[in-house]
Amino acid sequence: MGIPLKEKYGKYFAQLTSVSHAAAKINEENIYQEANQKARQFMDPLLSENLLPDSGLNHIENFKAFYDAVAKEGKHGLILMEHYTNLDLPAIVYFLDHGKEDWQQDFAKRVVAIAGMKLNEESPFVRAFAEGFTRVVIYPTRSLSKAEAAAQTAEEKAEEEKKARKINMAAMHAMDDCKKRGQMILVFPSGTRYRPGKPETKKGLREIDSYLRLFDVMILVSINGNCLRINPANPDDMLMDLVEEDKLLLTASPVIDCKKFRKEILDELPADESDPKQKTVDRVMAVLQRQHDEVEKIRL
C-alpha cells in the first residue's frame, strides 16, 4: 500500500504554494499558463525518488521522428496520451528534460497540455502542483454537465454555458497560437484519469475528433506503471493519491498522419453511422490499449 501524497511530500507544500502565482479562477483572459519553473523543481523528487531502474521513454525513435516533424518540418503536432495519474504529464516532461540529447530538452519545452479548470480551482496545492507545466485551460464537457445539473434556475444554467463557450473559444485561439509557435499540444483523450473497475473513465471523448482535424501529425503515448495512484478510499482528493515505487514506461507509436488516420476510419463506416466522431476516438483508444497491453507483457 502506497503512502498518501500529502503525507510523504507534505513538507514541500508550503514552499510550493509560496512560489505559486497561477490564477485561482479561470476566465477567457487567463487560459494560457506558462510553466512556472520555480514550481517545477518540487515535482522532480516525486519521480526521481520513486522511479525504478529502466524507467523511461520506450521507442525513443518515435519521439524523435515526431520532434523532427514539428521542429524541423513545421508540422502541427498532437500528442494523445493515456491518463492514469497526475504524474503522467510530469513524467513525459521529466524523461525528456533528463535526456542526453539536445532535441529531448527542446521537446520538453515545447509540450503544452490541455488541462481542465479543476486543476486551477480545486485547491492551492493542486494548482501549484499543476503550475509547473505549460497549459491551455479548458472548461471540460464533464464539468459543464455537472454545473448544469447543479444549477438552480434556467438563468444559472445559461450563464454557465456562456462561461464555458467563452473559455473554450479563447482556449482554441490559444492552442492555434501554440501551433504557430511550434509547440506540441498534449491531450488526454479520456478527459479524466482511469479508475480501475470503471471502464467509462477510459472511454475517449468525441471532442477529440476535432483535434484530428486540426493537426497534421500525432503520436499515441501509452503508459505502463505509475508512481502515483488514485486512493480508493479518497478517489476525489488528489492530495490523497498514493505514492508508489514503480517501473514506468512511456511508449510512443510511430508518427501518424492525423487526417489520413481519420479518413481511413470514416471510409470504413456505413453511410448511416449515427456518431462517426465517436468512432474515430474509439479507434484512438483501441490503439492505445493495444500498445499498452503489448508493453505490459515485457515491462516486468
Image (cartoon, helix red, strand yellow):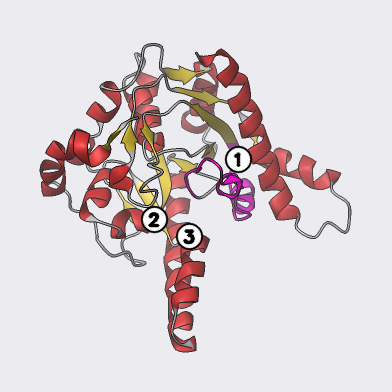
**What secondary structure is marked by label 3?**
loop
Q: Is residue 214 magenta?
A: yes
Residue type indicated by callout 3:
Pro
Q: Position of residue 49 (x, y in %)?
A: 25, 22
Residue at (52%, 24%) from the top-left corner? 251
Q: Is residue 182 magenta?
A: no
Image height check: is 23 above or below 297? Answer: below
Magenta stretch: give its range: 192-217
Crowding at dot 2, Cα within 10 Å, few <14 / some 14-19 / many 20+, comes out as: many
**What secondary structure is marked by label 2?**
strand
- Marks 2, 3: nearer the viewer: 3
Mark number for residue 183? none
Q: Is residue 253 visible?
A: no
Task: Give the residue at mark 3.
Answer: 140
Q: Position of residue 81 (x, y in %)?
A: 52, 37
Image height check: is 171 above or below 112? Answer: below
Residue type indicated by callout 1:
Asp
Q: Is residue 143 visible?
A: yes
Residue type indicated by callout 2:
Val
Mark number for residue 137? 2
Image height check: is 225 above or below 130? Answer: above
Task: Give the residue at mark 1.
Answer: 216
Marks 1 and 2: CB-CB under 8 Å?
A: no
Question: Could you tell whether 238 is left or right of 199 in the image?
Answer: left
Residue 31 position by quadrant:
bottom left
Q: Position of residue 277 (x, y in %)?
A: 70, 54
Of callouts 3 and 1, the N-terminal one? 3
**Nearer to us in this view, 160 or 71:** 160
Crowding at dot 3, Cα within 10 Å, few <14 / some 14-19 / many 20+, comes out as: some
